[in-house]
Amino acid sequence: MNAAAPAIAVRDLSKNFGRFQAVKGISFDVAPGEIVGFLGPNGAGKTTTIKMITGLLKITSGTVLVDGLDRREQPAQVKRKLGYMSQKFSLYPLLTALENIEFFGGISGLAPRELKAAMARMGEQVDAAVLGQKIHDVPPGIRQKVALFVCLLPGPEIILLDEPTSGVDPEARRLFWSEIYRLKTQGKTLLVSTHNLDEAEYCDRIIIIHNGEIVAAGAPDELLRRKQKASIEELFKDAISEHGQD
Ligand code: ADP
Ligand code: MG
């Protein structure tokens, strides 16, 4: 990782779908080793932004640099640095957890020995009976755990997780966040989107997006102090009323 460069630098990034502007010229950085929460209600523009960072969606205007590399000029190098877990179901529902790992590990170029080691690692974390069930039938918390495991198989440095905790129960959510911390201790950089404002507390820094615009950004405690608010909920409500509802 290039120590001088932000892990992700987004500048004046916009996305138009026809005449509708879903992302309106936003700028932010994610520093190496940080956990950044990308917070906002449904429809705010989180997925659109994340997909422009990964290259799954064409940028209308603005730039995305990943570890100093321009996403549009060096797409292959950028892709190798990024791990991405989509909001939509990213695993094959009719394959078992282990079959999913085998499949995705195979297409991400893992050698058979590495693949075997990865499957054994998963076996230490999740009960064998569960790993042998079709993903469709396993509890959402385990599904998310397997989806994250799959996204980590190629060993990315910078990890984009789009609403990884939506639809999972509070206990699974807490376990998921402890896994995110573990990744941070390994030096990974994480951008994690959520529509749950109460997940702000888990993040080093948060970026709040609403109607395609950033309405607040900073360390959660520091933001609350600076804006003199008691909760992120309150901060969000006031920030969007200041910004207008356009
Ligand atoms: P979030 O992930 O924060 O819920 P999205 O990025 O999915 O929000 O969507 C932002 C806005 O862009 C929403 O109003 C959504 O309806 C719109 N949008 C997303 N994808 C498309 C698309 N392919 N065509 C048209 N509008 C879209
Ligand atoms: Mg989304």
Image (tube, rainbow, N blue to C red):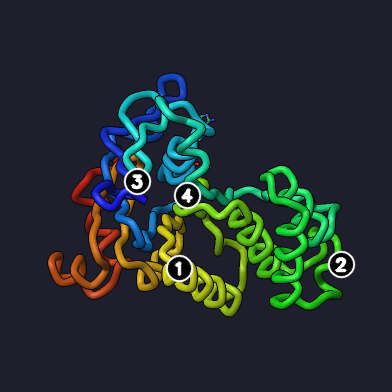
Which residue is tagged 3?
A: 8
Crowding at dot 1, Cα within 10 Å, few <14 / some 14-19 / many 20+, comes out as few
- Whether the residues at callouts 1 and 2 have beta carbons within 8 Å, the answer is no
Instruction: Name the residue type under label 1.
Output: Gln
Q: Residue at x 27, y 66 (%)?
A: 234
The circle drawn on residue 126 is none
Query: Residue 100: where, in percent of width, then height?
Result: 77, 54
Alpha carbon of mark 2 to alpha carbon of mark 4: how far? 34 Å
Instruction: Assign a secondary structure to mark 2.
Output: loop
Which residue is tagged 2?
A: 132
Query: Residue 153: where, in percent of width, then height?
Result: 63, 55
Numbered disc in front, either 3 or 4? 3
Q: Residue at x 51, y 32 (%)?
A: 76
Can you tell me whether the CB of the residue at mark 1 lies under 8 Å from the nearest atom of ligand 2? no
Crowding at dot 3, Cα within 10 Å, few <14 / some 14-19 / many 20+, comes out as many
Instruction: Name the residue type under label 3.
Output: Ile
2 or 4: tag closer to the N-terminus: 4
Alpha carbon of mark 1 to alpha carbon of mark 2: how far? 29 Å
Alpha carbon of mark 3 to alpha carbon of mark 4: how far? 23 Å
Alpha carbon of mark 4 to alpha carbon of mark 1: how far? 31 Å
